[in-house]
Image: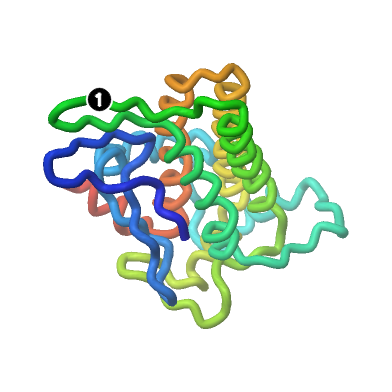
Amino acid sequence: MPSCGLPPTDGNQSTHMRAYRAPLEPGRGLAPLLGGFRAALTVACVASIALGCSGGLSPAGSSANVAAGNAGAQNPRLVPTATIRELMDDVVDPSADGLWGSVGVVRTRSSTIHRAPRTAEEWASVRRQAITLAESANLLIIEPRRATPKGTLAGEGELSPEEIDERIAANRVAFEELAVNLRNVAQKALEAIDRRNSEELLEVGGEIDVACEACHTIFWYPDQAARKSSK
């Protein structure tokens, strides 16, 4: 999986849309390596998104949100092929990393370099990433989609694949609205790109990070969020 930027080296200080994230190891879960911008992400901000979407989460096995989530019949021609994990690795993460890596500020001891698309080709390339990210949120909503491929082991601090599936099923409305939130911020990135406004794109990058983490800390590793909130 592509990284979203380079970590600062000795003597350099780098600011990007998102902190560096190392590739995940095969067989591991989705828990990211937290640092930089993400370390500054507050649990309160994530929780406010979740509560705004769902009015609070239902325990696994609750039928209230499941029924509400199934109220709108899905087109039977829409049949998922990939798991959520595979969509994250192959579609969501690469497109988000492309946006995060497109703009930033690199400060060295002698100079400050502003990274941004310059040519029409570079803007077109970043635009493709924004479109892909926005449409990937629609793919996440298609049911029934399992969390991970069979045999995937939970990473440290993560729920098991079965627990994730149960949590999503019990809180389907919240899951879908978090996906819609990701789509909305990706569309904001697309609008910034169409205006060729790199500063606005930089700001939206932080919103994309929050949108991603909001879903992860609710459905993938809620215990980590609980530990952070208690500190």
Looking at the picture, how far across and down is residue 54, in whole percent?
A: 54, 41
Camera-nearest residue between 112 and 36 = 112
Tell me if residue 102 can be seen. yes
- The image quadrant that residue 123 belongs to is top right
Q: Residues within 10 Å of mark 1 (few under 14, many from 20)?
A: few
- The image quadrant that residue 108 belongs to is top left
Q: Is residue 171 left or right of residue 102?
A: right
Residue positioned most to the bottom: 151
Looking at the picture, how far across and down is residue 14, in whole percent?
A: 25, 36
Camera-nearest residue between 90 and 158 = 90
Check disc 1 and report its element: helix, strand or loop. Answer: strand
Amino acid carrying mark 1 in the image: Thr
Q: Is residue 84 left or right of residue 15?
A: right
Tell me if residue 166 can be seen. no
> Residue at 56% of width from left, 26% of height from top?
119
Q: Is residue 102 above or below residue 159?
A: above
Q: Is residue 31 above or below residue 109?
A: below
> Residue at 65% of width from left, 38% of height from top?
131
Looking at the picture, how far across and down is residue 179, in whole percent?
A: 59, 44
Q: Is residue 96 above or below residue 160?
A: above
Q: Is residue 10 above or below residue 190?
A: below
> Residue at 59% of width from left, 54% of height from top?
91
Numbered-mark total: 1
The figure's colour scheme reads rainbow
Q: Is residue 177 left or right of residue 211?
A: right
Residue under numbered circle 1: 112
Q: Is residue 47 left or right of residue 70?
A: left
Looking at the picture, how far across and down is residue 87, in whole percent?
A: 59, 59
